[in-house]
Image: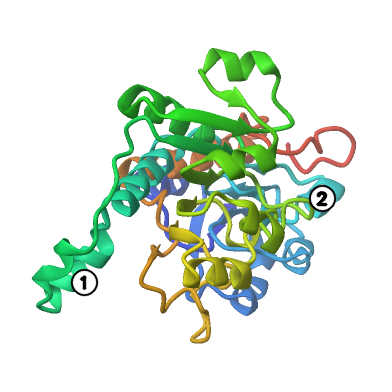
Amino acid sequence: MRQVVLLTHPIHADAMRLIRAVAELKILSKPTEAELLREITTAAALVVRMPISAEAVRAGKRLRVVARHGVGLDYIPVDVCTELGIPVTFTPDANTESVAEHVIGCMIALAHGFAPADRAVRQGNWAWRDKNIGCDLFSRALGIIGLGRIGLRVAEIATLAFRMNVRGYDPYLSSDVFASRDVICAPLDELLSKSDFVTIHVPLTPETKHLLNSVRIGSIKRGSFLINAARGDLIETEALAKALSSHHLAGAALDVLEDEPPKPDNALVGLENVLITPHSAALTAEAMYRMGMTAAEDIVRVLRGEAPINIANRPMQAGSRIG
């Protein structure tokens, strides 16, 4: 009997073909917790593109691997998987370029007013151009919170393409890393107060939830722009909305929100100086291929009794379900 690989959502066709060569592939008919609980009991592997609960993992009595289609491990109860001896894999390099390009694109769009200009023209207001003057990115100050793969790539593009003066905040990096990328190592408060653009690239953990709260948002340089393509919960929604409404912040580009999709009363949705995209920064053809294939290749390794390459936890000793 062939083992079952369960997908919360479809992935790249080539990746699904790779899985079908060694296992039966199932895709949830509805990406809900209830549907996942019904289907996971027969699965040997699970590919995750939505948050899943500890209950769902515990219900997967046959699970041998949980694969994150992406980078953010906050979607998976990794501690529970580790406790149960289930390896968790992820795709650490798959979406770096795509998200970094999205962030740079957002910076350009904010600086040049692409979104409000487009809306004005569609509404017959060509004269919008006479009262709304943008700014160049060239030689501006950029603050990057979190210098992992994506943050470092953003720094590289900003430095080489626009000669931006880049400050970075990351307490886990050595000064040598900052120096090698021409990034000024700065405390968070200094970064916020001196940057014309601020972009955040840290994982969501209990420590980073609302990292940008009302106090820190209030300390951001007046007239600056904020970009978030990481996780919505990193920024306090109400505080951000107030800063944008008062024009303390000139604008924000948000690929992620605290509530996805946004609720009707989300104050950010109605603001003219906010550019919102539907958590799609990593959804390019190239990134989808890389994420799908990386996840599928590790699943195939585990189903064949081999160790995965891109493992986020280490349940490989006693009790591991590999093999």
Mark 1 lies on a secondary structure that is helix
Residue drawn where x is 29% and y is 40% of the image: 136
Q: Is residue 142 left or right of residue 81?
A: left
Q: Earlier in the sequence, mark 2 or mark 1?
A: 2
Mark 2 lies on a secondary structure that is helix
In the picture, the disc for residue 119 is 1
Q: Can residue 255 be seen at all in this image of the molecule?
A: no
The quadrant of the image that shows the C terminus is: top right
Q: Is residue 70 left or right of residue 40?
A: left
In the picture, the disc for residue 244 is none
Name the amino acid type tagged 2.
Answer: Asp
Report x, y in % for residue 176. 65, 13
Please state which of residues 94 and 179 is positioned toward the viewer in this rendering: 179
Q: Which of labels 2 and 1 is toward the front?
A: 1
Q: CA distance from mark 2 to mark 1?
A: 46 Å
Q: Residues within 10 Å of mark 2 (few under 14, many from 20)?
A: some
Q: Can residue 129 be seen at all in this image of the molecule?
A: yes
